[in-house]
Image (cartoon, helix red, strand yellow):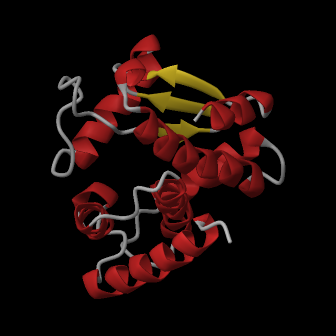
Amino acid sequence: MEIVSQRLAYRGVRIRKHSESWFGRLLARIAYWLFKADYPSPTDQYGWVICQTIGSTIWVPVNWDVFDPALKFELLLHEEAHTFQFERCGLGSMTFGILIMGFAYICLLPTVWTLRSRFEREAYYQSMRARFLMGLGVSEGFFRHMVKVFTGPGYVWMWPFPKKVDKWFLRKAIQANKEATIP
């Protein structure tokens, strides 16, 4: 986990708690509104795990300091994928990347072909990879939760075909396991 934090700091990525600014609190409220069916309330300091990335800032929950290191590692790898996406979409410019990624997220088309879907699939692949690197694997509960998130209201029915999501997650879990296995 420390290696990921150092790599983020080297790249100029900041990690901030939602509670540190009005913007962070606004993001937390929006996330709660979108994900309330999938996650506990942001006032439940022991269950709120939603992080968000805007440009070079990763916004984390108020109780980030007491998170299990394994969960922090998984979440940071996921959010790091988003920081790379901001850079890539902005052709190296975070500001331009914010505009492009913002547009991709505003276009909440419930289809697998949107940029938003691609961004989240790349990031969740990193989550699975992190779990395999730590020797945790991808449990049935994790797998079911991800299918629910991708096909439910939290991501505005981003990928409305549960069987296709099942197949994608299974294929990517096998790939992540192979990458994490040291020969």
Q: Which residue is drawn at 26% across and 81% down?
A: 162
Tell me the quarter of the image containing the N terminus.
Answer: top right
Q: Residue at x 65, y 66 (%)?
A: 182
In the image: residue 167, left or right of residue 142: right
In the image: residue 33, left or right of residue 183: left
- Residue 78 on image: x %, y %: 53, 50
In the image: residue 9, left or right of residue 176: right
Residue 119 or residue 100, whichever sits in front: 119
Residue sitting at the far top: 20
64 above or below 178?
above
Q: Residue at x 40, y 62 (%)?
A: 137
- Residue 172 on image: x %, y %: 50, 76
Residue 38 or residue 101, whichever sits in front: 38
Residue 56 appears anywhere in the view: no
77 above or below 14?
below
85 above or below 58?
below
145 above or below 162?
above
The part of the image, by quadrant, that contains residue 142 is bottom left
In the image: residue 34, left or right of residue 44: right
- Residue 29 on image: x %, y %: 29, 31
Residue 112 appears anywhere in the view: yes
Tell me the quarter of the image containing the C terminus.
Answer: bottom right
Residue 32 or residue 170, whichever sits in front: 170
